[in-house]
Amino acid sequence: MGIRHIARHLGWGRHTVQRYARAARWQDMVKGRKRQLPSKLDPFKPYLAQRWAETDGKVTILDLHREITARGFRGHYSTVRDWARRDLPRQEGFTPAPPPPSVRKVTGWLTRHPATLTEEEKLHRKAVLDHCPELASAAELTGSFAEMLTTLSGSGLPAWIIEATEANLPGISSFAAGLNSDLEAVTAGLTTDWNSGPVEGAVNRIKMLKRQMFGRAGFGLLRKRVLLAS
């Protein structure tokens, strides 16, 4: 019987039948068994095991990742961490060092309002900023700009632009310099209650309708939908 005939006979999908037909053993199809794929870490595993034995398990996973990165490894820290947790022997009572915080977490600590942070997050934020003066400067500039946004105190924008430009921080300094190209409009946006939110919402709604109607109807029906949605 062919694959399609078998699929119809069993009431299965054709691809499911193909996977069973191609399996060398029935064990390969048991749920939970996955084929072991080659890993970028494979050439470095002997070195990692040797370093672990030399230091009697006292070397940190972060140090191991740095060492093999210097030797050509191009994978992430999490790859080394997961392998070490799975395959390396652990000393009794040994507690692995916590992994470094992700970029997303640190960004949240810097951009969220301080009142919304938990005590633990505040401690983590302080520890990160103490280890990186550039990041501390970025956090201060981000906080002062957020204060201008929430309190509509745009009069302090020129001083903020000067401070941010002189900080020479990637992203923030270029952003600050770009504000000078339309300083009056940005200052007005940070000072008055007026904003272009309703206009942007109407434009987005029209774009959505246009995408929904593309290739389905002519201009007349599209015009009627736009007018009725206004």
Image (cartoon, rainbow, N blue to C red):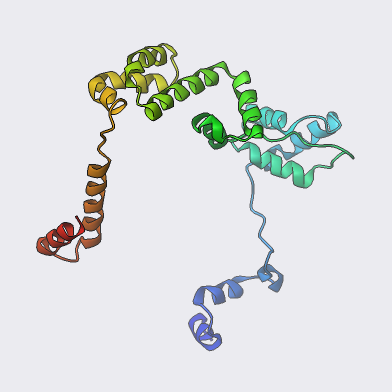
- Which quadrant of the rendered structure holds the C terminus? bottom left
Q: Is residue 17 above or below residue 138?
A: below
Question: Could you say where residue 103 lies in the image, as x and y percent from the top left?
Answer: 55, 34
Instruction: Please give the name of the residue rendered at 28% of the width and 32% of the height, measured from the top-left corner.
Output: 193
For residue 206, side relative to residue 27 (left or right): left
With respect to residue 163, does 191 lie above or below? below
Q: Residue at x 81, y 37 (%)?
A: 95
Question: Looking at the picture, how far across and down is residue 77, in whole percent?
Answer: 64, 36
x and y percentages locating residue 132 in the rendered image: 59, 19
Q: Locate residue 21: give its quadrant.
A: bottom right
Q: Would residue 16 be seen by someone viewing this image from the given angle?
A: yes
| Outermost residue, left side | 220
**Picture layout, residue 189 above or below residue 87:** above
* Residue 49 location, quadrant: top right
| Quadrant including the N terminus | bottom right
Q: Quadrant of residue 75?
A: top right
Q: Is residue 23 left or right of residue 89?
A: left
Viewer-nearest residue: 223 or 96: 223
Q: Residue at x 88, y 38 (%)?
A: 93
**Is 200 situated left or right of 139 in this image?**
left
Q: Is residue 141 left or right of residue 78?
A: left
